[in-house]
Image: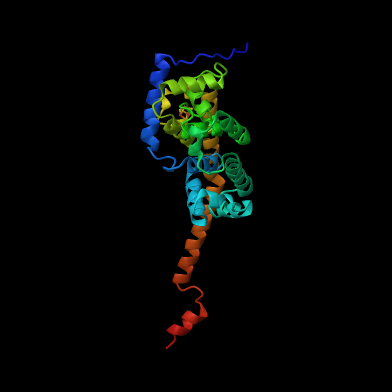
């Protein structure tokens, strides 16, 4: 039986308590500055687009590259896709081409719709301008548009990216298929003090430990709050990981036959050294040096 998506916009006290505990533990583990403190909304958006496809470290390097090749975002916008791609490649981002195209397209669409690279103007934009702009950047994944709305002060609910959905379902804040995306965002927005930092925490945790397949639960700081490791699927994955680890260890451990061959080789080497030292056949050069 399929569950009907609910439009409930409230978390129960238990869910809320668990959410706060999880957010606190993840904040202690990952710290306050997961994404750099970009001062402007365009910088925040470019970084968010970068980390949608690469690690935070590479994205930081790419932002430094961009600042070296352009004085401001408008100057970066007029660079060719090829130049942006080369900058990304220098930061070991691969494949760089599609990401360079996406960044260039976003910057160009923003400038065409707003006549500026300052996304802060959206907070004061007329409804039709805002609507036109959101349509123009419709090629971005929905959670990046939600991110944009958040950093521009148009919204106060966290973006619902795949990592956030996955982690919150595993932890038991949401049940799979039980709420629609907007209900989930509203429920989170109603209780989170810092939705932007919460999103960064979810992004980082989803990338480092709570991966789509075989999450590294044994190293996770929220293990105690998470139902997943004790679920049927979590237990099966842990068993498969243990089995894989055991097989790898067995592969590394030498067999008795290999051990015997190595011991024989060692004793052969020792024997030949002793023979050399004990007056066996001497090498001509050494023999010549000893001759009076
Ligand atoms: S315990 Fe495992 S499934 Fe749960 S949040 Fe941590 S990594 Fe994810």
State whether residue 157 is above or below residue 137: above
Residue 164 at x, y = what percent? 50, 28
Residue 173 appears in the figure:
no
Residue 279 appears in the figure:
yes
The front one of 14 and 218 is 14
The front one of 150 and 114 is 114
Is 97 positioned to the left or the right of 59 in the image? right
Instruction: Tell me the residue at 47%/66% (across/down).
Output: 273
The front one of 103 and 164 is 103
| Image quadrant in which the N terminus is located | top right
Residue 2 at x, y = what percent? 62, 13
Is 77 positioned to the left or the right of 31 in the image? right
Instruction: Tell me the residue at 55%/37% (across/down).
Output: 247
Instruction: Tell me the residue at 45%/35% (across/down).
Output: 200
Residue 291 at x, y = what percent? 44, 86
Which quadrant of the figure has residue 243? top right
- The mark total stands at 0
Residue 7 at x, y = what percent? 54, 14
The front one of 140 and 220 is 140
State whether residue 131 is above or below residue 116: above
């Amino acid at each position: 039986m399929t569950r009907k998506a609910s439009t409930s916009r409230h978390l129960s006290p238990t869910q809320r308590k668990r959410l706060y505990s999880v957010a606190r533990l993840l904040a202690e583990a990952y710290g306050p500055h997961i994404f750099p403190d970009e001062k402007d909304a365009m910088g925040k958006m470019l970084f968010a687009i970068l980390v949608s496809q690469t690690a935070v470290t590479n994205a930081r390097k790419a932002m430094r590259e961009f600042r070296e090749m352009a004085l401001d975002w408008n100057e970066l916008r007029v660079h060719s896709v090829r130049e942006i791609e080369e900058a990304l490649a220098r930061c070991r981002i691969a494949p760089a081409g599609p990401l360079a195209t996406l960044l260039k397209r976003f910057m160009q669409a923003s400038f065409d719709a707003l006549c500026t690279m300052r996304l802060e103007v959206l907070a004061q934009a007329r409804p039709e301008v805002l609507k036109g702009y959101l349509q123009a950047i419709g090629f971005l994944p929905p959670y990046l548009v939600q991110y944009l709305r958040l950093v521009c002060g148009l919204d106060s609910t966290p973006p619902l990216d795949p990592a956030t959905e996955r982690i919150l379902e595993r932890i038991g804040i949401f049940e799979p298929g039980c709420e629609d995306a907007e209900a989930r965002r509203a429920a989170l927005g109603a209780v989170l003090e810092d939705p932007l930092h919460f999103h960064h925490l979810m992004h980082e945790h989803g990338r480092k430990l709570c991966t789509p397949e075989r999450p590294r639960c044994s190293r996770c700081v929220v293990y105690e709050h998470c139902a997943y490791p004790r679920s049927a699927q979590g237990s099966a994955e842990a068993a498969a990981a243990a089995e894989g680890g055991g097989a790898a260890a067995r592969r590394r451990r030498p067999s008795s036959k290999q051990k015997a061959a190595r011991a024989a080789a060692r004793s052969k080497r020792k024997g030949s050294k002793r023979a050399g030292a004990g007056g066996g056949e001497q090498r001509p050069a050494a023999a010549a040096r000893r001759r009076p």
